[in-house]
Image (tube, helix red, strand yellow):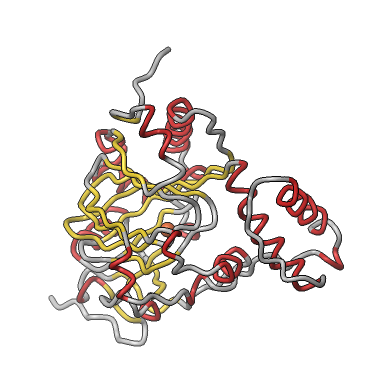
């Protein structure tokens, strides 16, 4: 049975640019009933709370220390959606593919359409997170290890992407993020915004960029809903492995190990050697550790911004 593509108005010229530039294109996921208020409330009710990220944050994009981890408390899906509409909340419905078969099918269809549209693209290790967030909420400057794509569904948001060619991200930073070390302390300087490519994303638009491109996001209007998908392909795996091999072999062997060239036999050998080293305990690199923020607030419809800090007493209902 044939199915209408989830991508809209893609030309071969566009598809060709996808992996090489900061790239905006159209899709039609936002037309689906699966992202309506009712469907999202139900999704939130069914979603295991251990895989629900609940965050809030400050207003200054340079103060990432104001990012907080929270708890959804005993709120229902409908109430969490209400808090996202009225408050300053960022919900991350993680591991959609593992928990929601109908959304997983949608993501499989999406990747099938993408691979059909982009000659030579073969992706694997797919993952998807659904982001539901308040007007004005933001995500601080950061970079992601896999290739990632943001399929925007509801509300409006402004995205800043900082091209790798500007050189604002050093190879050491990329290595640190890949090794799980630096993601929480990526400094941001507001003057870098002059180097950024910015886009106001509307429902029905998707943005992606070359792997490791740093970016930040501010919601500009309304309740925001977006699907964030991640994947790997051979080139993305090679890139990560070359950076990780440089870092690892520099600590074990003489030489500067700073060549990030991805093509040719040297890069292939590096990747192969790193894969081998991972299997030998004494020389294996440490797996990334990651950092978890302490839970410091609870979502509360009666509190300012629907955020009740946990060191404050709960508002008492009267009457
Ligand atoms: Fe990201």
Q: Residue at x 63, y 50 (%)?
A: 262
Q: Is residue 205 visible?
A: yes
Q: For residue 270, what is the image quadrant? A: bottom right
Q: Nearer the viewer, residue 203 or 75?
A: 203
Q: Position of residue 52 (x, y in %)?
A: 43, 59
Instruction: Classify the position of ligand 1 by quadrant: top left, top right, bottom left or bottom right.
Output: bottom left
Residue 262 in the figure: left or right of residue 95 = right
Q: How many marks overall? A: 0
The quadrant of the rendering that contains the N terminus is top left
Q: Position of residue 67 (x, y in %)?
A: 38, 75
Q: Residue at x 25, y 75 (%)?
A: 59
Q: Position of residue 207 (x, y in %)?
A: 34, 47
The quadrant of the rendering that contains the C terminus is bottom left
Q: Nearer the viewer, residue 69 or 67?
A: 67
Residue 312 in the figure: left or right of residue 184 = left
Q: Residue at x 54, y 52 (%)?
A: 146
Q: Position of residue 10 (x, y in %)?
A: 33, 29
Q: Is residue 73 visible?
A: no
For residue 149, above or below residue 279: above
Residue 172 in the figure: left or right of residue 114 = right
Name, please, the residue furthest toward the top. Answer: 1
Q: Nearer the viewer, residue 146 or 224?
A: 146
Residue 40 in the figure: left or right of residue 93 = left
Q: Residue at x 84, y 66 (%)?
A: 283
């Amino acid at each position: 049975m044939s199915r209408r593509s989830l991508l809209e108005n893609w030309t071969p010229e566009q598809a060709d640019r996808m992996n090489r530039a900061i790239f905006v294109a159209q899709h039609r996921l936002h037309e689906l009933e699966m992202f309506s208020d009712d469907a999202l409330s139900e999704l939130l009710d069914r979603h295991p709370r251990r895989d629900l990220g609940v965050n809030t944050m400050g207003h200054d994009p340079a103060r990432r220390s104001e990012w907080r981890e929270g708890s959804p408390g005993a709120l229902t899906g409908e109430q969490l959606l209400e808090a996202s509409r009225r408050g300053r909340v960022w919900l991350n419905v993680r591991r959609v593919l593992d928990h929601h078969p109908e959304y997983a099918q949608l993501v499989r269809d999406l990747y099938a359409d993408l691979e059909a549209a982009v000659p030579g693209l073969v992706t694997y290790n797919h993952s998807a997170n659904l982001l539901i967030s308040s007007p004005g909420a933001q995500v601080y400057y950061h970079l992601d290890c896999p290739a990632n794509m943001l399929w925007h569904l509801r509300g409006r948001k402004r995205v800043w992407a900082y091209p790798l060619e500007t050189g604002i991200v050093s190879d050491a930073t990329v290595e640190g993020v890949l090794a799980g070390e630096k993601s929480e302390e990526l400094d941001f300087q507001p003057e870098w915004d002059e180097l950024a490519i910015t886009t106001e994303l509307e429902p029905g638009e998707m943005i992606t960029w070359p792997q490791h491109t740093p970016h930040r996001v501010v919601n500009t209007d309304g309740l925001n809903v977006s699907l964030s998908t991640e994947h790997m392909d051979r080139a993305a795996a090679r890139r990560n492995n070359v950076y990780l091999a440089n870092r690892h072999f520099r600590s074990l062997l003489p030489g500067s190990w700073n060549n990030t060239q991805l093509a040719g036999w040297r890069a292939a050998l590096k990747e192969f050697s790193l894969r081998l080293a991972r299997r030998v305990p004494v020389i294996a690199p440490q797996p990334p550790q990651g950092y978890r923020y302490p839970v410091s607030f609870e979502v509360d419809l009666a509190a300012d911004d629907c955020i009740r800090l946990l060191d404050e007493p709960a508002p008492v209902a009267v009457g």
